[in-house]
Image: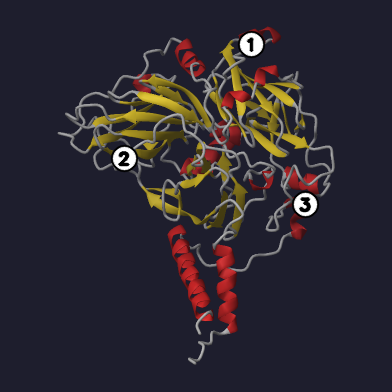
Amino acid sequence: MAERWRIPAALVAAVVWASMVAVPCSAEDPYAYFDWDVSYVTAAPLGVKQQVIAINGQFPGPIVNVTTNWNIVVNVLNDLDEDLLLTWDGIQQRKNSWQDGVSGTNCPIPSGWNWTYQFQVKDQIGSFFYFPPLNFQRAAGGFGGITINNRDVIAVPFGKPDGDITLFIGDWYIRNHTDLRKALNEGKDLGMPDGVLMNGKGPYRYNKTLVPAGIDYESINVHPGKTYRFRVHNVGISTSLNFRIQNHNMLLVETEGSYTVQQNYTNLDIHVGQSYSFLVTMDQNASSDYYIVASARFVNESRWVRVTGVAILHYSNSKGKASGPLPDPPQDFYDKTYSMNQARSIRWNLSSGAARTNPQGSFRYASINVTQLYVLKNTPPVVINGKSRSTINGISYSPPATPLRLADLYNIEGVYTLDFPTRPLKGASKIGRSVINGTFRGFMEIVFQNNDTKVQSYHMDGYSFFVVGMDYGEWTEDSRGTYNKGDGVARCTTQVFPGAWTAILVSLDNVGFWNVRAQNLDSWYLGQEVYVRVVNPEMTNKTELPVPDNALYCGRLQKYQNEQTPHHKATSSSSTTYIRGILLILMLLLVSVAVLP
């Protein structure tokens, strides 16, 4: 009888352990693993070298491409010279605000440390993005896409596209993000951006006077007759952008996790923090390439003409380069209603399913009684204690050293107050940490009243909300008569026009502390945010996950934090996949050896 091979016990243990880490249990939903090194790199998107934030050397960062209910594990190594968090815009973090990645729920990852996020994209589909929310860092990059695909058993309300294309659009400054936040700290306006980037690149040289030579631009390669899904995210700082593709219709099909009534647009305003999916069919004759354009809205176009992003749509049979003038933007500088009517035209597709088999319209939001009303009013920046600050209802939020959710868990008093006003305060504005006390399983109506002179976008973590109304003037109780009570779209970021209001409805079924904020970075940085506290009054562990074992501690809980030992740079995602493959082969080899006669 042949002698059995002998394998060291240590190798057996190592292979078994590695296989358990690398291959999730078949009874669970699948896992997707990522190792990200967040660091500075040098780039020149507008022709001037500057420091940008990259992930594994990529600017923009990698796309997280997963399917409904998958578990995502992201090990983040902070190679910046300042604290870091990543937030997952639009990912609802069911029962799990511990992974939300904002200062109210998480201590920051110190420079040189790593931290692992782990969460599930439970019952979600659609197009979202992630970014660093601290210290104005999004102005330097660090953002990337999140694509959540339907499970195979769920029908999608359109045919499978021939390709999936992600476009990040956004205004951009040549100044470093630290210089931008310094200007805000000194009470200065940021001024006009230096340009608009598309996928981290500058504009195609459509005009030799406006665009200098040598700038790298984005080019999208397509085939005639094919249909592509374009996922477009405005990841900029504060500029609303009009998006259009020369000579092509854009069929809107999805926004931030909801399928929409399918409508063709020749252009669409995409405000800061918003995400849309279009189907675009390559039905032109390809006499030349075509322009893809993102230009600033609600500005004096003669002054802002340089602030335009231009990419190229290149057919495989194109006969030449794009040339001539860009396709015209909406001619409505003095018409306040065009963009608002366009926004109102975006409606929920009630007959379509999304993450589940039941149609989206099975949630009859108009039949639910409102239990809480908050009118959240913003104004232009004001001076408080000698500093320029932005406010909601007269309160400018100042993040505490101890995150709100951790303070709640450890019963730390004095970190925040549960007295956020339901209506704007009368009298002088103040700095505070006042929190909205949400009623668990209540139905909240929030009215954003924008008394500033520019468009604001507002986002709510942990939820999708129904956009039910918007109009110019001051909101009153009578304004409810204009609400869309049937197919208002569910999303996580909505625009509020200057001198106007937007009303949303949200079902508070997700326990945790959830951030409501201005997506415009300057307003957010200066204090235009508030948290909603949602607590289940019953003692149960079924409505919120426990604090993770790897939680970071800071502020008044710093004593619980262990120091990290020096580390090596994070392994790239592709390298990790390779290593897991090798470990799996070793495991199979081990099994085969064990059964040899």
Who's the residue at 77% across and 59% down the image? 559
Q: Are marks 3 and 1 in contact (CB under 8 Å)?
A: no
Q: Residues within 10 Å of mark 1 (few under 14, many from 20)?
A: few
- Viewer-side residue, 54 vs 80: 54
Type of the residue with mark 2: Glu
Direction from residue 280 to residue 186 in the image, left or right: right
Say if 465 sits above or below 317 in the image: above
Type of the residue with mark 1: Glu
Residue 142 position, x and y percent, is 49, 46
Say if 66 sits above or below 157 in the image: below
Residue 218 position, x and y percent, is 31, 40
- Mark 1: which secondary structure? loop
Residue marked by disc 3: 556
- Viewer-side residue, 99 vs 489: 489
Who's the residue at 62% across and 24% down the image? 362
**C-alpha distance separating marks 2 and 3:** 47 Å
Q: Residues within 10 Å of mark 2 (few under 14, many from 20)?
A: many
- Mark 3: which secondary structure? helix
Who's the residue at 58% across and 35% down the image? 356
Residue marked by disc 2: 218
Q: Residues within 10 Å of mark 3 (few under 14, many from 20)?
A: some
Direction from residue 116 to residue 249 in the image, left or right: left
Q: Are marks 2 and 3 in contact (CB under 8 Å)?
A: no
Residue marked by disc 1: 474
The color scheme shown is secondary structure
**C-alpha distance separating marks 3 and 1:** 42 Å
